[in-house]
Image (cartoon, rainbow, N blue to C red):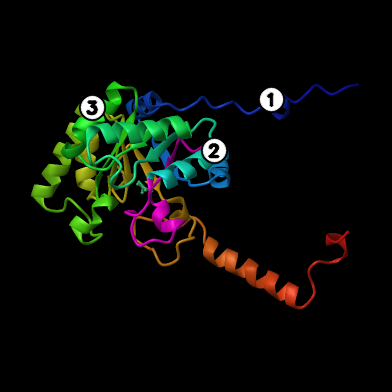
Amino acid sequence: MKKAANKTNTSRPAERKKITTKTLTTMKERGEKIAALTAYDFLFAKYLEESGIDVILVGDSLGNVVQGNPTTLSVTLDEMIYHAKLVKKSIKTALMVVDLPFMSYHVDLKEAVRNCGRVMKETGCDAVKLEGGERIAEVVQHLVKIGIPVMGHLGLTPQSINIFGTYVTRGTEPEEANRIRKDAAILEQAGCFAVVLEKIPARLAKKITSSLKIPTIGIGAGIHCDGQILVTHDMLGMTELFRPRFVRRYLDIASLAKEAFTKYIRDVKEQKFPNKNESY
Ligand code: KIV
C-alpha cells in the first residue's frame, strides 16, 4: 500500500513577501526587529536573500572594503550604480537601499534630484540613503515628494570624517546629543522612512527610537534600535584589522581563506592538484 505523503516534507517553504518601506514601519509597530546588512555584488546579495535578510544596503563602505580606500569620500556615483546593479540581480524580497556618495547630493537640489533619480532608474533599487540632518532636510522633502524613498543616517556619518577628525562615538556631550535628536525629528518630518544611527550611546539611541514613528537602524548604537546593520565584510571577519567593539564577528573568513589558499598553493607546487578525477 502506498504511504500517505508527508505534508511537511512535500510542502514548499512559505514564500516571503517583498519588503517595502511600509513593512519596516509595521515591523517597528509590532516590535519585530529589522535585520540589515551590506552587499556590493551578486553572490553576497544572493546569500543574504537566501538567509532571509530584511534590508540590503549597497553602502558606500564599498570604498573601504571593496576598493581598499581609507575613507568613503572617493566613491563615485557611477561606482555606486555599478555595484548596485550587481546586487539587484539577486534581490527578491529584501528592501534594497543604495547610498548616495559624498558630493552627489550637496551642490544643489537639482543635482541631488538628478543623481538620486539616476540611482533609482539605473539600478532598480527601492530607496536611497543620505547622510546628515537639518542640512539635507530640503533635499529629503523634495525627493519624497517626487516618489523617491529616503533612509537617513545620523551620528558618526563617515562622509563627514574630515569634520569630525576621528572615529570616536558621537553624541556623548549634551549639545551634540541634542543636535542628533533634533536632526532625527527633522528627518522624520521631512519624510524619511527610516534612519540609521551610527556609533552613538545606547541611551541616546533609545530616546530617539522611542520618540520616532519611523524605525531606527543601529550600528554601534545599542540594543534599543528597531533594527541593526553591520558591514557584511566586517561581520564575516574579512576585514582583519578593523575591530571596533560594535562589530560581532560571526566568521573568520580571512583565516579560512588564507588556509585554503595556502593548501592550494602547496598542492599545485607538489603536483597534488589536479588528480585523475579532476582531469579529462
Ligand atoms: O556605507 C555603509 O555601509 C553604511 C552602513 C555602515 C550603515 O552606511
The answer to whether residue 255 is above or below residue 210 is: below
Q: Nearer the viewer, residue 83 or 93?
A: 83
Disc 3 marks which residue?
Answer: 141
* Magenta span includes 57: yes
Q: Residue, x 84% and y 66% (percent of image)?
A: 275
Residue type marked 1:
Ser
Q: Nearer the viewer, mark 2 or mark 3?
A: 3
Disc 1 marks which residue?
Answer: 11
Residue type marked 2:
Glu
- Whichever of callouts 1 and 3 sits on the residue coming sooner in the sequence is 1
Q: Along the horizontal axis of the image, is 257 left or right of 160?
A: right
Image quarter hosting the N terminus = top right
- Mark 1: few, some, or many residues within 10 Å (few <14, many ≥20)? few
- Residue 211 x %, y %: 19, 32
Q: Residue, x 29% and y 52% (percent of image)?
A: 158
- Residue 105 x %, y %: 27, 39
User: Is label 3's Cβ within 8 Å of ligand 1?
Assistant: no
| Residue extending furthest toward the bottom | 270
Q: Along the horizontal axis of the image, is 77 left or right of 274?
A: left
